[in-house]
Amino acid sequence: MLMAHKIALNPNNAQTTYFACAAGTARFAYNWALAEWQRQYDAWKTDNSLPKPSQAALRRQLNAIKREQFPWMLEVTKNAPQMAIIQLGEAFRNFFAGRAKYPKFRKKGVHDRFTLTNDQFSVEGSRIRIPNLGWVRMRESLRFAGKIMSATVSRVADKWFVSITVDTEEPPKRRAENQGAVGVDLGVTALATLSTGEKVVGPKPHKALLKRQKRLSRSLSRKHLAAKAKAGLSHRQPIPKGMRLPVSENAKKARARLSRLHARIANIRSDSLHKLTSDLARRFHTIGIEDLNVRGMLKNRRLARSIADMSFFEFRRQLEYKAGRRGGMVVVADRWFPSSKTCSVCGTIQEKMPLAVRQWTCPDCGTSHDRDVNAARNLLALGLAALSGPTASSAECEVCGEEGAGSGRKTGVEPASVKQEISAESV
C-alpha cells in the first residue's frame, strides 16, 4: 500500500533559492502545457486530422524547445517541468471522468511545489539528496520502510516540506482498546460530544486569531493600494489585464506575515483533529457518526465561519482511515437521520428542534436531554444495530494510509500525542 510521510526541511539560503526556482519552473511548465493543450484541442476540433493533445506529446515538445527558448530550465532538475506536465495529464483525466473541475493555471505563491521521481533522489537518515543541489537536512527521518516511489517538495508560508511516498507492506494493525462502541455528534459549541457524556471543545483557531488576521490583512491591503496609486490607478479602478503592480519590500514582508498566520491557524486545527481522531480510534472499536452536508451548512451566513473552523469533513476522513488501521468500524448515519430530534430513551421523534434548543424534555417519557449527548447516544444505537447488519461502513477496507504516526513507523520515532482536553461534564 502507498503511504506518504510529510517532513519539514531545514534548507540553507542557497537551497531555499533552488526550491523557489524549481517550483517556478514546474509552474511555468504546467501553465505552458495547459495553454498548448487548449490551443491544440481547439485546432483538433477544427481539423480532426490533427493529433489530439496529450501529456506525453507535450513533454516531447517541451524537451525539443527548452534548450533554445527556456535555457533557465536546465538550472534545476528535469523532473520539475516533466512531472508538472504529467500532473496536468492526470488533471485532465480526472476532469473527463467527472471527478474534478477543468484544470486552472497555477499562480505564483499559491501551492508552490515540484515533484521528483524515485530515481532522481535518495534518502539517508535525516537528509535527502536532490539533483543539482545535494543533501538537504530533514527535521526527522522517514517513518516507513519500503520502496520509495516519489517525493514532492512544497512550500507552506515561508517553510519547505517534502512528502515522500513509500510503497510499503501493510503494517500490523494495532487493535483498538475495545472499550466498546461510541456515538460522536459534531457541533459548533463543542467539536465532538460522545455518547459517554464527554465533550471535546475544539480550539477554534480562526476565531481566536481573527483580530490579528484582520490587522495583517488591512496592512497588506494598504500597501496594495499604495502600489496602485504609484502605478497611476485610482482606488477602485481594476488592474488592466497584463499589468503587474510594483511590489515593495514592505509588501512582501506583510504578505509573509499573513501567510505565516494562516499556516498557524491550519496547524492548530490539524493538530487538534489528529489528537481527537487518534484517541477515538485507539479507544473504541465501533464509532457512529453523521453524514453531514457541510457544503449546505456553510450557506448559513451566521454559522459558516464557525462551521468552517471545525473542519467536519477532515474529522471524518481522519477517523475512517485511522479506525481502519486498527481494525475498527465507522458507521455513518444517513444524512436525514433525526439524531437530535429522537429521544434516546423511548424513541419518540419531535417534529421540530431549532438550533437554539440545547436542552429539552421528552413529552412522552419525561426524560431531560442534552441535545448533543442525546444525538450521540442515538448514533451509538445506530452503530450497535449495524454491527451485525450489511449496512455498516466498515473501515476494515484498505485506505490510502495517511496517518503520519502509523503502526509501521520506526521504533526510533516518538508516537504522535493523543492528549485531548475533555470537559468534566457527564451525563
Image: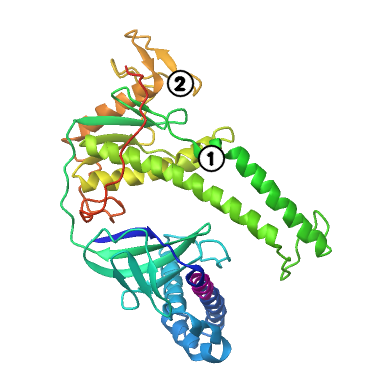
Which residue, given by chain and number where applicable, does mark 2 sit on? 353
Residue drawn at (55%, 61%) of the image: 110
Label 1, secondary structure: give it: helix
Q: Which mark is residue 206?
A: 1
Q: Residues within 10 Å of mark 1 (few under 14, many from 20)?
A: many
Q: Earlier in the sequence, mark 1 or mark 2?
A: 1
Question: What amino acid is at disc 1?
Answer: His
Left or right: residue 197 compared with residue 179: right
Q: Is residue 304 visible?
A: no
Q: In the image, is residue 310 above or below residue 382?
A: below
Residue drawn at (83%, 57%) of the image: 234
| 251 or 272: nearer the viewer | 251
Q: In the image, is residue 191 above or below residue 48?
A: above
Which span of residues is magenta-colored?
Answer: 17-25
Task: Give x and y (percent) for residue 152.
Answer: 40, 67
User: Is 286 part of what is drawn in magenta?
Assistant: no
Question: What amino acid is at disc 2?
Answer: Met
Magenta region, mostly helix, strand or loop?
A: helix
| 162 or 330: nearer the viewer | 162
Q: How many marks?
A: 2
Mark 1 and mark 2 in contact? Answer it, CB < 8 Å. Answer: no
| 379 or 263: nearer the viewer | 263
In front: label 1 or label 2: 1
Q: Which mark is residue 337?
A: none
Residue drawn at (49%, 43%) of the image: 295
